[in-house]
Amino acid sequence: MTAVQDLDLLAYVDRLKDKVLVITGGANGIGKQTVLDAAKHGAKIVIGDRDRTSAQDVANEIVRGGGQAHAVACDVTDYAQQRDVFELAIERFGSVDIVVACAGVSEIGGFERIRTDDKGKPLPPDLKTLDINLSGSLYTAHLAIHYLQLNRRDRSSLKSLIFLGSIASWQAIPGGPLYTASKHAIFGVTRSLHPTLDIHNIRVACVQPFFADTAIVPSYLKAFLSGIPLTPVPRIAATILHSAADPRKETNGCAWALLDDGPVIRVDEGEFKMGVYGELDKRFNALNKGVRGVVYVKNTLQDLFRSLGAVLLIIAVLVGLYLRRGV
């Protein structure tokens, strides 16, 4: 694990100039701070947010400052609306370079509170938290895989997909099973996409902040956390942009954890494999090695038989010619 200081987070901001950043949930809180900072460094912004009025206010603020930005209403649980956000980016700017899946909510519905019908039978739980945090982010990622490569002329150009995880990506939050499930899942999606996106030179990262002073944190939880330092929103936004713009191949696929009000902790992909994860990884690698060994032997035998077959064919032809000469 590597501590990343605030000054280090600014190391690659020059790479943001003229890049097109598409963000869900960019009207308030962390998303708003992210697009304002990106615009200061010359990025072109497209915001998709359910709060259309606030999203347009942010876009107007960027334009007044000399930047370029557009906003559109978007419910992330509606695939067509998300697609429209990406289409707007293509229409206005011709490409998509950075995608940030930032839209999210806290625990909704009280999963552990059992509601019953008029016959006393349990009603299904409200899974809106998963719909927004997980399904919405998966829609964003699915679209990003297409649009990040659309109109791409230079394979070495900056292309990034950044997920907003949480401390709940690592640590379960009592009373928040759906929120915890969604953020655990987002981390898993990041890890799953990394090997394949890396082949296409597309960066992927999961930024995982502790609680921050935003509207997503309910008032009762803020009261409970009274006296505990919250993670500064500007630092979270800077981490999102840093993880997107960092050109180093070895930092692709990393987790970027903001555990408190201290420095960012970069957790490299190889360091995910600790404890039980490490044991599972060893067993998987052993199994994978065995499978690869079987495949290797199979391919070797096939090549050997193929080679022997060719040799036998040549010998047969030579023998035939010899016999014909003898005749």
Image (cartoon, rainbow, N blue to C red):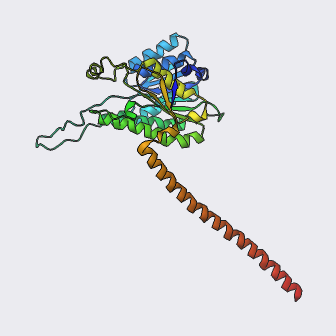
Q: Position of residue 270 (x, y in %)?
A: 52, 40
The spot of residue 245 in percent (x, y) is 57, 27
Count of picture labels? 0
Q: Quadrant of the C terminus?
A: bottom right
**For the point 88% across and 87% down, which residue is it?**
326
User: Is 30 left or right of 10, judged from the image as shown?
Assistant: left
For image coordinates 57% across by 60% down, the residue present is 293
**Would you place residue 193 above or below residue 99 in this image?**
below
Give how far across and how far down residue 7 sits, in percent: 55, 18
Residue 37 or residue 62, whichever sits in front: 37
Q: Position of residue 172 (x, y in %)?
A: 33, 35
Question: In the orientation shown, which residue stands out farthest toward the bottom?
Answer: 327
For residue 220, side relative to residue 59 (left or right): left
Q: Is residue 215 left or right of residue 159?
A: left
| The furthest residue to the left | 119
Would residue 325 be visible to someone looking at this image?
yes
Name the foreground residue: 298 vs 310. Answer: 298
Task: Report the residue at 40% width, 28% height from top.
Answer: 103
Position of 113 with respect to 249 (left or right) is left
Query: Please, is residue 174 above or below residue 290 in the view?
Result: above
Residue 77 can be seen, yes or no: no
Picture layout, residue 279 above or below residue 176: below
